[in-house]
Amino acid sequence: MEVVAFSAPVKRIMAVIEQAWRRPFYPIHWGKDLKQIHELVRNGEYYRIPVIRKRDLSQHWGELMEYGDFTDVVSSSGTTGRPVDLPVHRLQELVWVDCVSRVLTELGARPGDRLLHLLSNNDMFTLGPLVLQAAKKVGLGPFRCSPQRVRRIFDVVHYHQPAFVVGNPVVMLNLAEEQGHNFPDPECLPDYAYFGACGSFDADNQLTPVAQRVKDLWGLKETLNEYGCSEVGSIGHECLSHAGFHINDDAVYVELIDPDSGMPVPPGQPGEVVVTSLSMPRGFLAVRYATGDIASWMDYRPCACGRSTPRMGAIIGRIDHQLKIQGQTVFPDLIFDVLGEFPEVSDALVVRYPDPVLGHNAEVWIGYDTSANLNEHVSAAMLRRLAVSPHVRSVPIDLIRKIKAEKMASGNGVKVPRLVDLPQHVEAYL
Ligand SMILES: [Zn+2]
């Protein structure tokens, strides 16, 4: 990849640091005085300021957050201890809504158009309410439908024919597959999709197998993916050139780091997404917030669409989901990309379990209505694509669904789990 010189927005970062300094957590966390911090930023050594992680948000809530004139609270799951409820200030929310609305306008939405809104608006999910507000900002008429209320979705499609849909591609695929012949014809369904809450393209900017199947079954003409997290809002979105996520560089500054060393990764290499908020005010003012997500690359070259904002490649995994298989790091997402090549696999799960020798071990479970031969084919495909293959096991499909449902009930009820940590050895579940 050709390397393009890119410099951090020094003045804006300094302004954010000065604000962050007033929150008791940061000066202690940084262990330096303000002058030293400024020097690091000016000298291009911003990466030497320690990152902040979700556990810090939980442990130091009182020294980090400001209620301000908050108009919403977003919550993020996945920590023990104090729940991470983040106040979203009035103007902060407007910035977030604006960033989300860019996906809708890029898709071609205009006032008077109709939107099938399939994202959850529940209390542990941030994107649903933001999309609703973004639709209002653009002038799109939203029809809010829970993905579980299939009859209502079909009625909205039949009677109102929305041209746009916002949804999680995994949920949209389940909907189409479970309904089979009852699913409406593509010509009745929306033409343009905003895929949220889940990745829909890979490190080569190609649709994932799941997203491709959704595109085919729904008869979509165009799809765009957006990426963000509750702590910092929308981070970026695809443009119609499908060249990665354009970073919302007016709202956030993004770095990719090696999670082990904390150093910036070489150009074009995957790394953990670290975000600094650039717009203020913020209930949580993020200075080098390490998201735990691994992105495949950053590209600072101008895009074919004409924008010159940095672009970030697909999210290929989470640092806490890295699997060690025969000494090699493998991300579950890449395993699911391989499984997507096998339409016979109706459901699948990666399970991680304690192992007396290795510490932990992982294997891939695929639905039962398959032959033993298929296990070998899947293993061979993994070896080709990933250079190693975890053990592939056929299990009853009901077991996969039961474990997923249990995991989903303990999470935010929105994201469908694909990696599950089992407390006991796999043999205990079979
Ligand atoms: Zn572009």
Image (spheres, grey):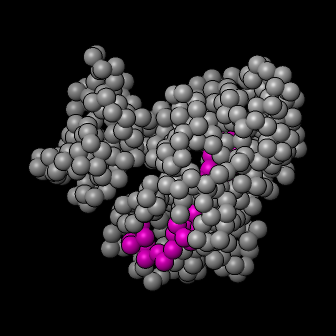
How far across and how far down the image is residue 235, in percent?
A: 65, 52
Q: Nearer the viewer, residue 42 or 83?
A: 42
How far across and how far down the image is residue 303, in percent?
A: 60, 66
Q: Answer above or below: position of 250 versus 420.
A: below
* Magenta segment includes 218: yes
Q: Nearer the viewer, residue 301 or 205?
A: 301
In this orientation, does residue 402 appear?
no
How far across and how far down the image is residue 106, in percent?
A: 64, 71
Left or right: 19 in relation to 324 = right
In this orientation, does residue 326 appear?
yes
* Residue 360: quadrant of the picture: top left
- Name which residue lies at 75% across and 61% down: 98
Q: Answer above or below: position of 193 versus 25.
A: below
- Name which residue lies at 45% across and 83% down: 187
Left or right: 275 in relation to 72 = left
Q: Quadrant of the C terminus?
A: top left
* Residue 22: quadrant of the picture: top right
Q: Which range of residues does the magenta coloring cover?
A: 214-242
Q: How many dots with numbers? A: 0
Left or right: 347 in relation to 344 = right
